[in-house]
Structures are given as C-alpha cells and as structure tokens.
Image: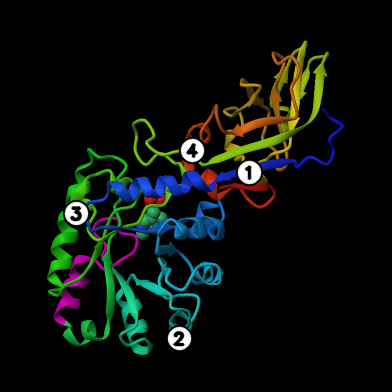
C-alpha cells in the first residue's frame, strides 16, 4: 500500500448531482409561485461556487446569493447573463457604479446603505433587508416606519425583494419564528406598495408555506447539512478521505502527538493520516474525533496537528491506503457534533489542499 507515493494526500469529493437534487427537492416543497434561490456565499460553503452555481443554473436556478462583491465577480464570468447575483453584505467593497456595471444586486441593510446607494444608483435593482429580531443586519421597525414616510426615497429605489432572516428556523417549536413572520408581514406592508418578499433560509422552508413568500434562500441544505433536528431529508454531498502515511507498531509505553497528552500502552498500532486543522479537521476534534478504515471506527488520539492526525488502528487487520474523514459512516453533521460546532463551519473550513473531484 505504501508504494503509491503519487496518490493524492487528501480527496474531497463533491456530488453536484446530489446538490442539484437537493435544490430541486427544496423547490418542490415551496408553495406554487414561490421561486428558489441558491446561497453560494463563501465559495458555496467551501465546496466551489463556480461548479455549484453552474450545476444549479443548468437545473433552472436563476437567483444566486453571495456575501461579498468579489464573490459575485468570481461568478459573473461563469454564469450565463440571465443569472441574478445578490450581495448579502451590501454595497460594500466597490462603488455603486461597479455593482451596476456588472449587474450585481446589493442588499441594502441599513439606512446608510440606502443613502449611499440611492445617491448614485437611481432606480437600479436592490434588495431591502428588514431586521425582524436577529439584530444582525437590516433596518429595524422604527427605521422602516420612518422610511415608509419618505416617499421621495422609496421612489428612487428599485426594490426587487424585501427580505428578512430567521434566527431560529431550525427549531420549529421556537416562538420566535411566528414573531418574526408577523413582524415581517407587518413591516413590509407598512411600506405600502406592491413588493415581493423573501424570508426562508433552508430550515425556514420546512416551517411551512406561510414562510415561503416569493423567494426562498436555501444554503446549507443544498450541501447536505441537516436543516432541522430530525432525520436528515437531504442527500449527502461531501466525502472526505485522507491518505494513511505511516503505520506505527507501539511496543513500549509512550505518548502520542504534541504536548504528549495521550498515553499509549503496548501492544498498539497507530496510523498517521494526512489531514489536519489546516484542512478543516478542526483542532477541537482532539479527544473527540474518529476516522473509519474498512468501515471500522478508529478513534483519533493525541492532539490534531496542522497537517496530520493519528488514529488508533490496533484493531484493524490491514489498514488500506485511505481513511474516511467524512462519508458513509459519519456525516458532516456528525463530525461537527464531535467538534462542538455546526456543519457550516466544517464545510467552510475545508481549505485548498484537497484534490477535488466533482461528481456529476
Ligand atoms: C447564509 C444565509 C442564508 C442561507 O442560510 P442556510 O441556513 O444556510 O440555508 C439565507 N439568508 C441569509 C441572509 C443568509 O445570510
């Protein structure tokens, strides 16, 4: 097994067909007339915004959300001209004329954003963000009611959608969902003009038709992350495998890894595997993570390093070439649970060192 020195050290397989199927499945859940966007910010949650958005465009997706101007720029050359690119963090990082030249649609999150945008971008498409309780981005209730009075300001805006964002959509029993829904309906109505609305992220889609409005904005569910707390309705998208670099037979008592924190007693066998925290195998998986070899669970022992982890493979007869980091035996959400974080952070941390294989 160790003779294949030309093997890739780590392999990230991304199933574009599964992403497309997830998008189509979410779209089918929406009430008639509602459209389905794709959130492809942060390089499509680390999986490759170009590849992902191209695949989704082929399946009919026309609305794409990124967070930064630069992310929109990276997609403009990739996607056909009928793709609409929305920039969640607002008209920052470039001048309004640059947004307009490329046809990017900023989300106006504050009254400052509105003034800045309307000065130079008369009647150019934008989204208006209402904060309904998350207190992160968007105009609050008072500001929306003031804006409603300012007919001259509203006249120069070309609002494609009024949007808001749910704080607790993954917890259907949270009272806050209904509170945000009611406030969203009330404040958007206060603007007193026909406006299209957008509220639901992935989890919001599963809260029911009242949350769907005109445009849903799923992200995580496209990438196979469970949008709720029950059984995952989405197809898995990501497989991560890493090369076993070395097997060690432990025949004297000793320790494993930095800090010599893990004591190991003979007889034992360890595998050093080519993945580390620089590859999104988070350091917080120290003492908690495991890999699978031939379907057998092998606990990660000692501290996670930058480029390697060490697994206890004492019970594995002949460890092969690769260990499963994410895949058939443990999902992205499982690994996130072990790391004390969420699947979103695992995916966006994966990094650049993997050999990427896109399955279509
Ligand atoms: C990231 C984001 C989404 C997508 O959320 P998911 O939970 O990944 O579906 C939707 N809307 C806004 C405003 C976001 O920031």
| Dot 4 alpha-carbon crowd within 10 angstroms: few under 14, some 14 to 19, many 20 or more | many
Q: Mark 1 or mark 3, which has the lower sequence index?
A: 1
Q: Secondary structure at mark 3?
A: helix
Residue bearing mark 2: 97
Residue 242 lies left or right of residue 210; in this view the side is: right
Instruction: Kindly identify the residue that appears in the image at 19 percent across and 54 percent down.
Output: 181
Q: Mark 3 or mark 2, which has the lower sequence index?
A: 2
**Is 310 situated above or below 108?**
above
Residue bearing mark 4: 236
Instruction: Kindly identify the residue that appears in the image at 26 percent across and 65 percent down.
Output: 130
Query: Could you tell me if residue 229 is visible in this image?
Result: yes
**Residue in the foreground of this view, choosing between 344 and 326:** 326
**Residue in the foreground of this view, choosing between 304 and 231:** 231
Residue bearing mark 1: 12
Q: Quadrant of the N terminus?
A: top right
Q: Mark 1 or mark 2, which has the lower sequence index?
A: 1
Q: Which mark is residue 181?
A: 3
Q: Mark 4 or mark 1, which has the lower sequence index?
A: 1
Instruction: Kindly identify the residue that appears in the image at 34 percent across and 82 percent down.
Output: 124
**Residue in the foreground of this view, choosing between 254 and 167:** 167
Picture quadrant of ligand 1: bottom left
Residue 217 image point, x, y percent = 35, 56
Residue 310 lies left or right of residue 247; in this view the side is: left
Q: Secondary structure at mark 4?
A: loop
Q: Secondary structure at mark 1?
A: strand
């Amino acid at each position: 097994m160790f003779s294949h020195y030309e093997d890739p050290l780590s392999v990230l397989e991304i199933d574009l067909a599964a992403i497309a199927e997830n998008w189509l499945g979410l779209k089918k859940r929406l009430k008639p007339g509602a459209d389905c966007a794709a959130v492809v910010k942060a390089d499509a949650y680390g999986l490759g915004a170009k590849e992902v958005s191209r695949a989704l465009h082929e399946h009919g997706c026309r609305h794409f959300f990124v967070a930064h101007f630069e992310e929109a720029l990276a997609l403009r050359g990739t996607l056909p001209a009928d793709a609409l690119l929305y920039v969640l963090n607002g008209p920052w990082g470039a001048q309004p004329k640059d947004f307009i030249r490329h046809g990017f649609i900023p989300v106006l999150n504050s009254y400052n954003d509105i003034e800045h945008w309307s000065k130079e971008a008369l009647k150019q498409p934008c989204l208006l963000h209402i904060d309904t309780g998350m207190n992160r981005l968007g105009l609050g209730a008072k500001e929306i009611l003031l804006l409603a009075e300012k007919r001259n300001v509203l006249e120069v805006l070309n609002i494609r959608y009024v949007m808001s964002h749910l704080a607790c959509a993954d917890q259907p029993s949270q009272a806050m969902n209904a509170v945000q829904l009611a406030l969203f309906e009330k404040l958007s109505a206060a603007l007193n003009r026909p406006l299209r609305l957008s509220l639901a992220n992935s989890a919001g889609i599963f809260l029911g038709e009242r949350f769907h409005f005109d445009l849903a904005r799923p992200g995580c569910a496209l990438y196979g992350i469970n949008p709720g707390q029950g059984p995952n309705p989405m197809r898995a998208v990501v497989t991560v495998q890493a090369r076993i670099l070395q097997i060690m037979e432990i025949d004297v008592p000793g320790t494993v890894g930095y800090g010599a924190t893990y004591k190991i007693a003979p007889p034992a066998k360890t595998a050093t595997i080519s993945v580390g925290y620089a590859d999104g195998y988070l350091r917080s998986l120290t003492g908690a993570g495991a890999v699978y070899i031939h379907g057998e669970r092998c606990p990660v022992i000692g501290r996670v390093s930058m480029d390697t982890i060490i697994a206890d493979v004492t019970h594995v007869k002949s460890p092969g070439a690769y260990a499963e980091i994410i895949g058939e035996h443990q999902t992205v959400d499982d690994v996130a649970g072990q790391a004390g974080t969420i699947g979103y952070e695992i995916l966006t941390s994966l990094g650049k060192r993997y050999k990427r294989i896109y399955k279509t």
